[in-house]
Amino acid sequence: MQTKSLRIKPYRSWAIDDRSSAEAIARLKRLALFERLRSEGCSTETSLTAIACSKATYYRWRKRYQQQGCAGLEPRSCHPRNHRKPQWSKHQQQQVLHLRRKFPLWGKRKLWKVLARDHGFTLSISTVGRIVRKLLRLKRIKPASFYYGRVKPKRQRKFKHHAKRWQYGMKAKQLGELIQIDHMSVSFTEGFQLKEFKATCPITGTTIMRTYSRASSRNAKRFLAYLRQQLPFEIISIQVDGGSEFRDEFETACEEQTLPLFVLPPRKPKWNGCVERANGTTRYEFYPFYEGSLTVAAVNNCLAEYQHCYNHYRPHDGIGLETPMSYYQQLTQAA
């Protein structure tokens, strides 16, 4: 004998299908809230604002619900109906595969040049890149990073402490704001190497530089103290690249001194353009002509003299052939 239950579902679940997803149920509740607000005298605009929905979306949901029930409120796929088909042949793909296996570190530009020169292919550089990406997805070739020893992808930095990510469009608007700090390696003919830390004001071009034996966070902290002594104005904020020397002790020092620290995105040295340009200047104007002893103290003594010349005597194109200090004096007098 078959027994059927006569228990009626609660009124709150009459219109809700047991198989509905949480998103469909949430949309149904928003439709019901809209109808209740309208019945209580609220305007259409106020009701739509309350359910956080546009007018077109509301009417589209209501129409689907009237036609299909809760199934019509289910989220739909956003994938395109017509996918782009490959614009290359299997022979061309096999040729790219053969060439990439022979030269595993070559990129799409080199592969494209050899294919066009030696095989007469008319593929574009982007098409060759798509073929390489497909071969990587099929695991028929290995990425170039594999041959450099980077088996796992580099983890993205998470900002949990004082430093923050530099945002696109940030620009210094007053003295001491977004002081650009960077370091570069300097090699001499005798095998002697130094790490030079440099800071540049993007408004006046005032540059402070000092060398150390290692590019560590401790030396970066020492350079920050030296920078605050040398600059004729107060530091408001600092921007650096993602180097490890600007973490740990350097970040802690900025936090203790309440100096906002902004870190540039990866592979974006152009946003540190002022200090990068200053790096090139000292690399070609100072170090090739240095004739002193190869010690950190001796180099710093001569570098201090060059720094004074750089800030007080050398004209700069970026500020109308003025010196950084004369331009700074003009700004302070105008203020």
Image (cartoon, rainbow, N blue to C red):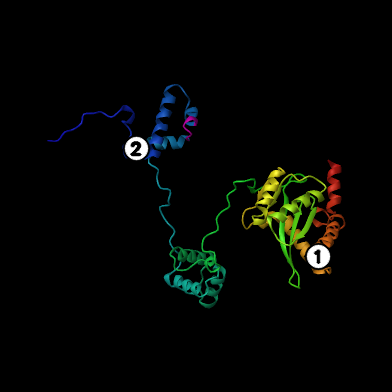
> Looking at the picture, how far across and down is residue 292, in whole percent?
84, 68
Q: Which residue is mark 2?
A: 70
Secondary structure predominantly adopted by residues drawn in magenta = loop
Residue 175 colored in magenta in the image: no
Q: Could you say where residue 90 lies in the image, as x and y percent from the top left?
A: 42, 70
Is 282 on the left-hand or right-hand side of 63?
A: right
Residue 170, visible in the rendered structure:
no
Q: Which residue lies at the image location 40% right of the left edge and 37% below the top edge?
A: 61
Confirm whether residue 36 shows in the render.
yes
- Place of residue 142 in the rendered image (x, y in percent of width and height, measured from the top left): 49, 67
In the image, what residue type sits under mark 2?
Answer: Cys
Q: Secondary structure at mark 2?
A: helix
Q: Is 189 left or right of 38, judged from the image as shown?
A: right
Task: Give the Cα distance between marks 1 and 2.
Answer: 74 Å
Q: Residue furthest bottom?
A: 118
**On-image quarter of the C terminus:** top right
Based on the displayed image, in which of its 4 quarters is residue 84 positioned?
bottom left
Q: Residue at x 46, y 64 (%)?
A: 134
Q: Residue 185 appears at what percent x and percent y?
A: 71, 64
Whether residue 50 appears in magenta in the rendering, the answer is: yes
Q: Which residues are magenta?
A: 49-53
**Residue that mark 1 sits on:** 285
